[in-house]
Image: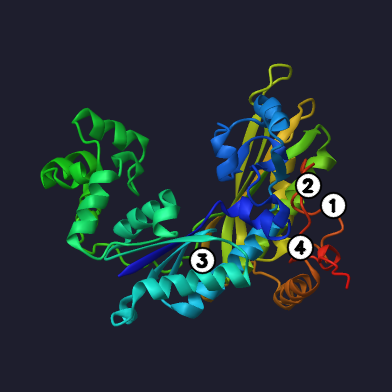
Amino acid sequence: MFALIDCNNFYASCERIFRPELNGKPIVVLSNNDGCIIARSNEAKALGIPMGAPLFQYENVIRENNVYVFSANFELYGDISNRVMSILSDFCPEIEIYSIDEAFLDLSQYKNFNLRNFAEEVKKRVLKWVGVPIGIGIAPTKSLAKVANHIAKKFPEYTKNIHIIDSEEKKLKALKWLPVEDVWGIGPNYAELLNRVNVRKAYDFIQLPDQWIKKHMKINGLLLKYDLSGIKMMSLETPTMRKNIATTRSFETYYEKFDDLKERITTFASQCAFKLRQQKSHCKSLSVFVATNRFSTNSDKYFASIHLQLPYSTNSTIDIVKYAIIGLKKIFKEGYQYKKAGVICHEVYPESFYQPTFFENRNEKHLLLMKTLDKINHTYGNNTIRLASQDEKGLNKMKRNFLSPCYTTRIEDIITIKV
């Protein structure tokens, strides 16, 4: 059996942990630079506020209904996510962290356990220790666990946010209820294709001939059919090393000067180097790009990118920043209003694969320097030590007018309790 644990309205729930008076109140969370709505509480959904809507289009609805608005606080959300996943791994070490608010558990070792009691204990501990409500779906396969989780969250009064598919009758009932477009792995294009052949429910999908599915949906579609039918075709996936590492951001304002872009590229390159060291890897090439606002009608458009082959593999902040700035100098043009830029590391390999070259090699002193840098920043907070050319605001130098405190990651934001 597999369990899928999904945090309910995760971003909104994170904000409510430290603001309990917001329970039952409508909440929306905004994207970078407070542009679009990327998360909504159930109360906000009930007001008809759609996902991805630009904030300015719903300002009247928000004001008239006293909707609470927050800028995305990814530092806080990431820390809360780590706390939830830590609890889940205590219950079951066989875990696949699927996203910031979802995880699969392989419950093979719980064959003789009462799975409902197990799920209730998980739900109780996460809520008590972290303060985030969760939904739990349990079923013989991963895709059916997704279905069970969907039912658990759709009918909370009946399921208490826990649903278990442990019989043929429950499986068929669930598949005959679930719209095919809500099946995990079936996107809008496949849903449209299936609707054209009168496939409306998940049950209709598993009745399709294997040959038709293989022809139109390839092998992954066929594997999904079997998995939905209760035949285990998917196991937990182990974390893999990313082949490319990127840091890109839109700016809070327009940048026209080279020095302003240089600071942003320096910061983005530094973050890429940190990510490389986090997964114990290095890169052999990188790309840099800059772009104006493609939606603006009042200024000229410009986009440029450059790929640079490094003389040696490295994960040193000093090295990667050096070559990123070289790339920026080659593509920067005066007279444009830049709104976005980024750095992408390519040809990423494990640190153990480092191969010295005959003529040029990395500076071995950088290894100890970067290790010390990361340790200090981990202990005292990100951006405690940085390059002199970086802004003290760090990576997220963006418009965030509705940002909540980082209650769990910054000492100055810790709540003070007066007794």
Pair 2/4: label in front: 4
Q: How much space separates mark 3 and mark 4, taking CA atoms?
A: 36 Å
* Residue at x 19%, y 58% (from the top left corner): 169
Badge 1 amino acid: Asp
Q: Do we see residue 67 in this rendering?
A: yes
Q: Position of residue 32 (x, y in %)?
A: 68, 42
Task: Identify the residue at image location x=79%, y=54%.
Answer: 394
Give whichever of 208, 351 is nearer the camera: 208
Residue at 37% x, 71% y is 116
What is the spatial separation of the Cα atoms under label 3 and label 2, in whole angstroms?
30 Å
Checking the image for residue 391, the label placed there is 1
Dot 1 or dot 3, earlier in sequence: 3
Left or right of 199, for residue 87: right
Do the numbered discs 2 and 4 sit on residues whose CB atoms are within 8 Å? no
> What amino acid is found at the position of numbered circle 3 in the picture?
Tyr
Q: Residues within 10 Å of mark 4 (few under 14, many from 20)?
A: some
Q: CA distance from mark 1 to mark 4?
A: 23 Å
Q: Are marks 1 and 4 in contact (CB under 8 Å)?
A: no
The residue identified by callout 4 is 407
Mark 3 or mark 2, earlier in chain: 3
* Secondary structure under the numbered disc 2 in the rendered image: loop
Alpha-carbon neighbours of circle 3 within 10 Å: few (<14), some, or many (≥20)?
many
Q: Are marks 1 and 2 in contact (CB under 8 Å)?
A: yes
What is the distance, in whole Å, between disc 1 and disc 3 at their CAs?
30 Å
Q: Earlier in the sequence, mark 2 or mark 4?
A: 2
Q: Nearer the viewer, mark 1 or mark 4?
A: 4
Q: Position of residue 393 (x, y in %)?
A: 83, 52
Name the N-terminal-most of marks 1 and 4.
1
As drawn, the label of residue 349 is: 3
Q: Which mark is residue 397?
A: 2
Q: Amino acid at mark 2?
A: Lys
Is 133 drawn above or below residue 374 in the view shown? above
